[in-house]
Amino acid sequence: MGAIRFACEAEARSSSGLAAAVLAVLLLPVTAAAQGAGGEWTTPSGTVQGTRFSELSQINSANVASLVEEFSAPTNAVASHEGQPLVIGRTMYVVTPFPNKLIAFDLDSPGSVRWTYTPGADVYAHGVACCDTVNRGAAYGDGKIVYNVLDTTTVAVDAVTGKEVWRVKLGDPHRGETMTMSPLIINGKVLVGNSGAELGVRGWVQALNLKNGKTIWKAYNTGPDAEVLIGPNFKPHYAKDQGTDLGVTTWPGTLWQQGGSTAWGWFTYDPTLNLFYYGTANPGVWNPSMRKGDNKWGASIFARNPDTGEAVWAYQLTPHDGWDYDAISESIVADLKIGGFPRRVLMHVDKNGFGYTLDAKTGEVLVAEKVGLATWAQKVDRTTGEPKVISEMRPHQGRITENICPTPLGVKEFAPSAFSPLTGLQYVPAINACNNFEPLKALYIAGTPFMGADLEFLPPPGGYMGELVAWNAAKGERAWSVTETLPVYSGVLATAGNLVFYGTLERWFKAVDATTGSVIFQTQLECPIVGNPIAYSAPDGTQRIAVYTGVGYLAGGFAGGPCPAAAQQGHGPSPLAAAVAKLKTNAGPKPDAESGMVHVFKLP
């Protein structure tokens, strides 16, 4: 059972619950209040702004305790189910982990399948995926369901017939490239990025034509300005990010060519500014002694024009990343009042432990405070944009650096947060863990692990490893948190019913009061939850909540192993899974399960 921690007990007691929250949302600017999904869920985060906020309120804090399961359906796949379904009209679309089948469920006959599309994925990709053979979901546009296959193929499927419309191969698994992220569709373009930083690939993003899959533009995340699509309109806010060809000059020799900095996380978009945002992964080899310099543009956030790919600004959160602090977390677009003035902002809780509130137009840091335990840096200097790194916490080859917090899993990993305009809070799935870290000499061989690291997880501070944190991004402070025994690896859904939904590695699916954090509903499912809940309107016009179950070898290591147990038992090329397994944590006995599942809940 989770324990609630209030940052301010007085504020919590003064809340008048759902009525006050509904009044609050009515008083917010239209731009913020409109950033919610309606009866359908057509894009990975519900909205292009990345809010994961549903405007549906039939299920609310007054009645959610009575939720019942309407149906559950197998995906006939194992490994971590990290994405979320789409719902368009009377059909639910589910993309499975490898081999990445697309299943169309008939919502008029709950649990029945209209059709299944099989992309014919190259099995070679299964063996080079860094950290489980996952898929983070699809996007819908122009009558097509579009998603990425692990083997670096992007496919478009007719949403009605299930027939393939187009497919395009974008990378080479034999060189270590894979694709796990969910696309974002903007202005007739499909925005995608690659994975594989742990194998020394070079990160990129591309825009594909939604009609035929042809590449419109491609931008690398390391290398010369011409290849990063940095031109005269590139205006970073901070001096540390200004200069010519920094994607080359901040690296030794030609190591930028194996510089990682992939874009395997979440993309968001501001329709007003016509900018899309994404974060980049670690700068290649984990051993920082092998790559002196800031290593741009690893561990950075980019703002780009989706029509041209041109970079408008960039901000490197963790220069010379020596801790594997990818910046791939979502950057949610919203309107907040900062210092008494309304600002269009990005809310980004980074692996490195800081919650950043950035000006969406310029990349200026407006707020940067610690969301969780971070021993590697004192603070972020808002004048320079630089983190104030504690020197003894910088890893170096030849010695073990002890008690680094957070671990390479971060205070927040890939699991996406949600933002509610009703409460003004960002709801963050968090991890509370520290480690000892030793960089090792690594040799680059294409298509093999290029990491150079050994690490050991330590007993969690405070005796718990996970939290759901309600974060006030305008002030840089916690409102409340719910602690969990194991890391919170599921995504979060906020709704107009003053609710927040999430799942745990102990198999609990929960709903909490968005204002106070009180747990109102929970039910234990057959496998741990690393998927992202969604809300939608069923054909009968009433609200539903859906979520996946099923976990693979990495996150499953915290929970006593994969579930279903048939999931891959190996550790993959990353040292993370082996370190997690040594902790010997356990979520207790698991019922027999043969497949990942999608579960759907409704009111009686």
Image (cartoon, rainbow, N blue to C red):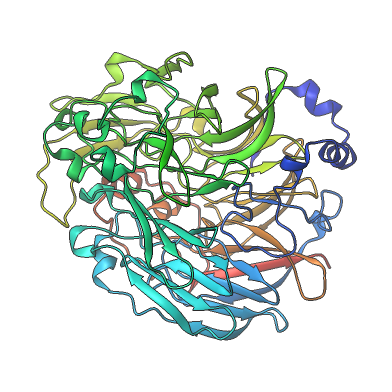
Above-or-below relation of 44 to 427: below
Above-or-below relation of 281 to 78: above
Which residue: 72% across, 22% down?
8
221 or 176: nearer the eye? 221
Which residue: 49% across, 29% down?
363
Above-or-below relation of 148 to 264: below
Across and down, in percent, residue 188 comes to 53, 62
Residue 594 visible in the snapshot: no
Which residue: 53% across, 29% down?
355
Query: How many numbered marks are there?
Result: 0
Q: In the picture provided, is 23 more to the left or to the right than 474?
A: right
374 or 263: nearer the eye? 263
Above-or-below relation of 36 to 85: above
309 or 550: nearer the eye? 309
- What is the quadrant of the C terminus in the image? bottom right
Q: In the picture provided, is 445 more to the left or to the right than 577?
A: left
Q: In the picture provided, is 473 more to the left or to the right than 188?
A: right
Which residue: 36% across, 28% down?
318
Across and down, in percent, residue 206 comes to 38, 56
Using the rendered view, name the quadrant where residue 9 is placed: top right
Across and down, in percent, residue 483 comes to 60, 37
- For this orientation, the residue located farthest to the front is 232
Residue 293 visible in the snapshot: yes
